[in-house]
Amino acid sequence: MEVSTGVARKVASSGYGVFAMDYPGFGLSDGLHGHFPSLDKPVNGVAEHYSNIKVLLKNPKLRNIPTSYLFGQSLGGASRSILLSSISLAILTST
């Protein structure tokens, strides 16, 4: 958790907006620690969180935040990678 906090602070101090999430059962959240029945739940959690951020960024007060990036470590990194690969695959197969 402290590594993530340090990275988030460094990124924020460089002028980027930082929006963090904590999976149920991980970090400081409630839930059975370290348990998830499948990768679908964390991947969908990342997708939902990112969608909510995109809505927030439509607020005129937040328009100066640069392009959005997804960053994660461990389960967050894996979930991010799965989500992005599924989006890329959907784009490639829809053309």
Image (cartoon, grey):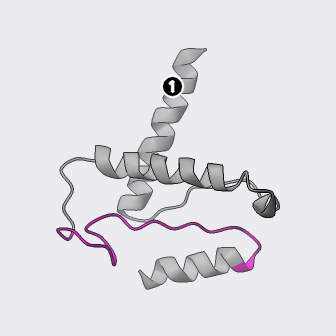
Q: Is residue 5 above or below residue 70?
A: below
Side of 39 relative to 77 (left or right): left
- Quadrant assignment, res 75: bottom left
Region rendered in magenta: 13-33
Residue positioned 22% across, 47% down in the render: 38
- Quadrant assignment, res 22: bottom left
- Total numbered badges shown on the rendered structure: 1
Q: Is residue 21 magenta?
A: yes
Q: Quadrant of the N terminus?
A: bottom left
Residue positioned 55% across, 52% down in the render: 52
Q: Is residue 70 above or below residue 88?
A: below
Q: Main secondary structure of the magenta part?
A: loop
Identify which residue, 56 or 37, lies in the foreground.
56
**Residue 40 pos. (x, y %):** 30, 43
Read off the residue under disc 1: 90
Q: Is residue 50 above or below residue 88?
A: below
Side of 63 relative to 93 (left or right): right
Visible in this render: residue 93? yes
**Residue 19 pos. (x, y %):** 57, 66
Q: Quadrant of the C terminus?
A: top right
